[in-house]
Amino acid sequence: MIRYTIKLSQEEVNGLMAIINKGSHTTQKFRAAYILLNCDEGDHSEKVTNEQISKVLKVGMRTIDRVKKKFVEEGFEAVLERRPTTRVYEKKIDGDVEAKLVQLCCSEPPPGFAKWSLRLLADKMVELEYVPSISHVSVGEGLKKNELKPWKVKGWVIPPKSNGEFVANMERVLDVYKRPYDVNNPVVCMDESPKQLISAGQLSVPMRPGQEARVDYEYVRHGMVNIFMANEPLKGKRSVEVTEHKTKKDWAEFIKKLADEQYPEANRITLVMDNFSTHAASAFYETFEPEEAKRLWDRFEFVFTPKHGSWLNMAEIELHVLNAQCLNRYISTMDEIKREINAWQDSRNNKGGKINWQFTTKDSRIKLKRLYPSIND
């Protein structure tokens, strides 16, 4: 085993002391200076073993040996400066390989896998001989550059292509949304959504400084309720009703309250809603006497969103706000959910929050051109 002996000149000692005592230097330079000073076996220095230096400086024995070797073989300056790296990394993904990666990522995953993962893509790239080898990190960089995320799937209601019924109903809704505010003929959007009544399996831990609130992931289910939402976008007004069920009768009674309590002075109410089987004039006749049913039916103009076009219903936006601001927590009883929703409704109505709808028929004919039937086919 080669033993390296360090004997520093006074000038070298002074230089090393200057590094330790003043100036801004890298960690590597500080460490090398301390090691050399402690390894010095000159006439005016006490001999210190590598074991002692390792214990005092908290560095490994091999590090000490490397510093001593470099000092003896390459000199004082070389041991203090980090050698510049000259390694050249081969680029794993060029334009051709990147195109193949994108094509592969957009294809169906192999049998037995629901989605592509980075490692699965890397293995498949090698299997198909696109590259001799590649890491999942390199694959991830290629996907990030092309904004691809194969591990994420977003649920979406996709309308069929070239569908005359869809575009006809869509343009009808968009025309209604262009109407100016009219107190005698308000445009009201209506939607509904189920909500579970649940309570936590264990007591929650409240938030405190340095710790988030903790809610047990187990919960106890106490049934379901239905939430009816009606909002008038141009007025910034919404009305919410909680019912035990979601039947024609429940819907008809909600619409009656809407007409008689929310808009008693309106001559006619334009009601935009999804085309569910419960949303029909027949519900009035199955719930009320014929005279009352006809009176209610005459008060409304029904405008239905197309199938797979619930995003056109502005009441859906209000339901998302309600869920995010009020219902995104454990609520166990119908009385409690009614109280919380009424408080939310009053607060939001007092603020007069309106929906600034921007999507128009002109936009639809450009952005959703694929949905329009081609008359030349």
Image (spheres, helix red, strand yellow):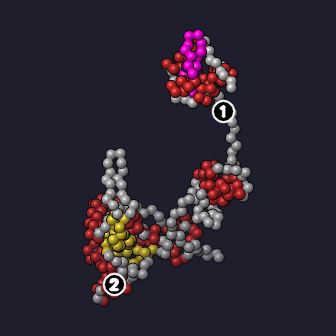
Residue 147: percent from left, percent from top: 58, 54
Residue 185: percent from left, percent from top: 34, 73
- Residue receiving disc 2: 284
Residue positioned 65% across, 76% down in the render: 377
Residue positioned 67% across, 53% down in the render: 98
Identify the image quadrant of residue 236. Answer: bottom left
Identify the image quadrant of residue 109. Answer: bottom right
Residue numbers of the magenta segment: 25-49
- Please tell me whether mark 1 sits on a helix, a strand or a loop: loop
Establish if 61 lies above or below 179. above
Amino acid beneath label 2: Phe
Q: How many neighbours does mark 1 have within 10 angstroms: few (below 14), some (14-19), or many (20 or more)?
A: few
Q: Is residue 146 rendered to the left or right of residue 333?
A: right
Residue positioned 70% across, 43% down in the render: 90
- Residue receiving disc 1: 85
Amino acid beneath label 1: Thr
The verdict on residue 146 being magenta is no
Residue 248: percent from left, percent from top: 36, 82
Establish if 60 lies above or below 34. below
